[in-house]
Each structure stands twice: as structure tokens, then as C-alpha cells.
Image (tube, rainbow, N blue to C red):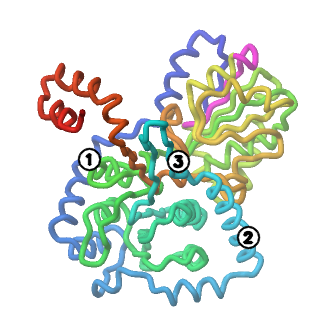
């Protein structure tokens, strides 16, 4: 773990390492991913079945074996514990309510001369959602991807998720039933992205692909962009925490570890002007590590990619965090809303001592599919708009084109586009 003061002589170099945390060696895997994509484009289901046998340790008997049946989803839903079922319903309802507030609306504006301008917002026809299932299965990611697509009005929702040893996660199947999805395929990795981007005999081609994944998934999404739209190129999970002396060290320690347990490549960064708090958090991390079910993963992550930075004041702390632009940002201070106007870049912002990042992963309502690696400077969380598109609406009356048509023709003439010019002039008085 990096433990430094902003006043240290070697601080700039260590901070640059943090800023580079999200860099993925896409070049190293791009050849492998390209071969996988070309296999799918050429051999379709035959290639899918071969890749599943190679990467997921089971061999589909036929094409039908690629799909998870709705009956198995319903059975999984019926078999889960009632308290867990109620928790899933709570998450579903809150996520849906939040995303319904996001839905953009079509609009029209009429000018006095008869011009009608506007914007028509419509959903994409089909969406492919990738749900990870390698090191762990994430039913919460299913909810976070399916619900905004449903709110947007997407008619055809396709889900791909890896099933090592042909053993689908029962809770994931239950979540599928809860969401009412029917097309779920036991396909993972770059193969799944290629299948949804280009289509196979079983998996239909989609218009947009969303969802997190490992470096192979991220590389595949980057390669198929343009053939389909994508949400973002997401890397390993990360958390940043701004804290003052009012924060509790044991709370901050476990919050940092809540991201570290995701992946050895996850980043957990605390920035505080309090040396006393920084020292206490460092000690608490070691105490918490011994209690975690994924201790080995969390320990490697926190040791190799964790950081605690002590600054001269909170202004400097906020400035450094803006440069980091974290996926998740907790503001654990006495008056968190006072800092909010100064926070420029973060995927999701958690304000106050009683708002751990984990609450946002499951039941708060906002989406947990967020930009990583500093891309919060220009990307936004997954939302309803990722599944919608806009069309400009333009309608001119005779009076309207006579009013501004001459200026239009003049600009077209200046650009040397005489057909453009004349298509306007033939309509003028």
C-alpha cells in the first residue's frame, strides 16, 4: 500500500502511478480477442461451442444447450429464501423508480412562421447485456443492466453470462425471472461480445452492448464498437474516499476493502488531511482483512494498488481526488454537501458517514455500472439514455422557408455545393 504525504519529495511520482491505475494492457490481448471475434463471425455457433469447451470447462451438446430455460429461472426464483427474495424485490423497485426519473422525453417547438423543430426519443430495438460470472456471479449487475433497458422500452433484451462447468448461478437465474427476461445464454468472455455484436444461429445481433467484464470483455467491446454501440470500456473496480477527523477509521477501512475484495486489480484510495485518521485506517485495514471471505484477493489488491494520502488541507485533498476521478467516491466529512460543488469528476458520489459505497451497489437505486480508471472525466453511469437514441425533427412551412431560405442558399453557395443551394432556391418565391 502506498502511504504518503503530499509534501513528500517523491509524492509526484507515486501519485502518477495512481493516475495510471486504470491502464489495461489491451495490446497484449488484442490478438487473442481478434481471433475470437473472427471465429464467431465465421463459424458462429460452432465457434461458440468450441470456445465454451476451451474456456468454461464444459461442452454444449447442441445449439439448444447454449440457452438457459425460463423454467430453470422460475424454479430458481421459487427456491430462494423469502428474505433474499424480498431483498431482490426491494432492489428491483428502487432501481426502477430511480431510472424512471431519467427517461428523456420527446419535445416539439413551433415558431410563429410555422416552423416546427423538435426531438424524438426512441429506444433501440435490441440490447445485449453482459453479466460477469467468472470469479463471482453478480445478480445485482443483472438488475442494473436490465432495468434501465426495460424502462427505456427496449423490446428485445439478450443476456450472456459465463457458466463455468455448466453450473449457472441460482441467484442470477432467480434475478432473471424477477426481471422477466427470457433470452439468457451460457456464453462468456469475448465470445459473448462477438456473438451479440454480429449474431449467430442462436444469439441475435443487437444494437447496443452494456455490462462490465474482464480485460478480454473490455477489449472485445472496444473492437466491436461501431458495429454496435457500447456503454463504456470499464476496467477494475475502484473507490476513492475523502475524509476528515469526524470519520470513523473502522468504517473507512472496510469501505476501502469493499472494493479490494472484487479483484486483485481493484484500487482503493483514501485522501485525508488528518494524519491521525490515516494511521488508524491503516491499522484497521489489517484487522478487517483477517475477517474477509475473499481475504487473499483483498489483501493483494490493497497491498499492490491501495493508497492513503495525507494532505495539508481538505482543498488539496479534493483537488487530488478530482485528478483521480474515481468510479466511486465517498465523502466522509462533517459537512459533505459543502464539498459537493467542488467535486468535478466521479462516477457516483456517496455523501455522509452513513452512506457506504456498498449501499449503491445493491439497493440505493442509482446504477452501479460506472466509469473507471479516470474516465469519469468524460463518461457517465449506465442509464436509460444508453438504450435510447434521438432523432431531430424539422418541418418548415412555405412562409418559414421564404423567411430564412436565402441565407441558407448563400451559405451552400459559399461552400460550393450548388445542389444544396438550388434545392432551397426552387422552393423560394
Residue occupying the point 29% across, 61% down:
197
**Residue at the disc numbered 2:** 87
Q: State the extent of the magenta-drawn residues as a range.
A: 305-315
Q: Could you tell me residue 236's position as x and y percent?
A: 50, 46
Above or below 357: residue 294? below
**Residue at the disc numbered 3:** 264
State yes or no: residue 294 in magenta: no
Q: Secondary structure at mark 1?
A: helix
Label placed on residue 30: 1
In the image, 153 versus 38, the foreground residue is 153
Q: Is residue 378 left or right of residue 222?
A: right
Residue occupying the point 62% across, 22% down:
320
Q: Could you tell me residue 117's position as x and y percent?
A: 43, 42
Q: Is residue 402 left or right of residue 149?
A: left
In the image, 399 versus 88, the foreground residue is 399
Which label's residue is closer to the chain start, 1 or 3? 1
Q: Is residue 166 left or right of residue 261?
A: left
Above or below 180: residue 266? above
Q: Secondary structure at mark 2?
A: helix
Give the distance between the C-alpha atoms of the residues marked 1 and 2, in whole angstroms: 40 Å
Amino acid at each position: 500500500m502506498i502511504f504518503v504525504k503530499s509534501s513528500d519529495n517523491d509524492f509526484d511520482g507515486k501519485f502518477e502511478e495512481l493516475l495510471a491505475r486504470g491502464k489495461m494492457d489491451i495490446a497484449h490481448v488484442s490478438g487473442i480477442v481478434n481471433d475470437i471475434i473472427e471465429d464467431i463471425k465465421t463459424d458462429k455457433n460452432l465457434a461458440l461451442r468450441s470456445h465454451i469447451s476451451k474456456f468454461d470447462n464444459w461442452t454444449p451438446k447442441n445449439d439448444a444447450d447454449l440457452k438457459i430455460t425460463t423454467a430453470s429461472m422460475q424454479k430458481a426464483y421459487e427456491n430462494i429464501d423469502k428474505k433474499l427474495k424480498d431483498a431482490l424485490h426491494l432492489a428491483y423497485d428502487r432501481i426502477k423508480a430511480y431510472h424512471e426519473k431519467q427517461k428523456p422525453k420527446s419535445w416539439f417547438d413551433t415558431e410563429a412562421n410555422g416552423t416546427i423543430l423538435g426531438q424524438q426519443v426512441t429506444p433501440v430495438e435490441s440490447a445485449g447485456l453482459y453479466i460477469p460470472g467468472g470469479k463471482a456471479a453478480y445478480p445485482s449487475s443483472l438488475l442494473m443492466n436490465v432495468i434501465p433497458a426495460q424502462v427505456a422500452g427496449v423490446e428485445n433484451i439478450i443476456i450472456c453470462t459465463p457458466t463455468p462447468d455448466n453450473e449457472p448461478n441460482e441467484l442470477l437465474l432467480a434475478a432473471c425471472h424477477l426481471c422477466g427476461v427470457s433470452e439468457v445464454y451460457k456464453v462468456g468472455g469475448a465470445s459473448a461480445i462477438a456473438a451479440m455484436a454480429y449474431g449467430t444461429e442462436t444469439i441475435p445481433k443487437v444494437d447496443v452492448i452494456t455490462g462490465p467484464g474482464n480485460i478480454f470483455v473490455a477489449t472485445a467491446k472496444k473492437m466491436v464498437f461501431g458495429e454496435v454501440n457500447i456503454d463504456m470500456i470499464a476496467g477494475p473496480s475502484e473507490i476513492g474516499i475523502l475524509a476528515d477527523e469526524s470519520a470513523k477509521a473502522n468504517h473507512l477501512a472496510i469501505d476501502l476493502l469493499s472494493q479490494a475484495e472484487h479483484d486483485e486489480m481493484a484500487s482503493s484510495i483514501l485522501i485525508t488531511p488528518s494524519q491521525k485518521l490515516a494511521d488508524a485506517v491503516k491499522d484497521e485495514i489489517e484487522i478487517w482483512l483477517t475477517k474477509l471471505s475473499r481475504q487473499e484477493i483483498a489483501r493483494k489488491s490493497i497491498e499492490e494498488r491501495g493508497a492513503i494520502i495525507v494532505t495539508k488541507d481538505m482543498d488539496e485533498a479534493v483537488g487530488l481526488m478530482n485528478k483521480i476521478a474515481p468510479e466511486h467516491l465517498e465523502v466522509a466529512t462533517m459537512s459533505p454537501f459543502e464539498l459537493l460543488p467542488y467535486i468535478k469528476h466521479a462516477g457516483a458520489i456517496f455523501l455522509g458517514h452513513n452512506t457506504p459505497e456498498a449501499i449503491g451497489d445493491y439497493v440505493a437505486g442509482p446504477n452501479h455500472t460506472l466509469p473507471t480508471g479516470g474516465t469519469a472525466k468524460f463518461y457517465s453511469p449506465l442509464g436509460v439514455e444508453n438504450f435510447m437514441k434521438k432523432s431531430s425533427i424539422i418541418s418548415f412551412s412555405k412562409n418559414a422557408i421564404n423567411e430564412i431560405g436565402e441565407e441558407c442558399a448563400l451559405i451552400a453557395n459559399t461552400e460550393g455545393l450548388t445542389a444544396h443551394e438550388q434545392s432551397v432556391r426552387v422552393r423560394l418565391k
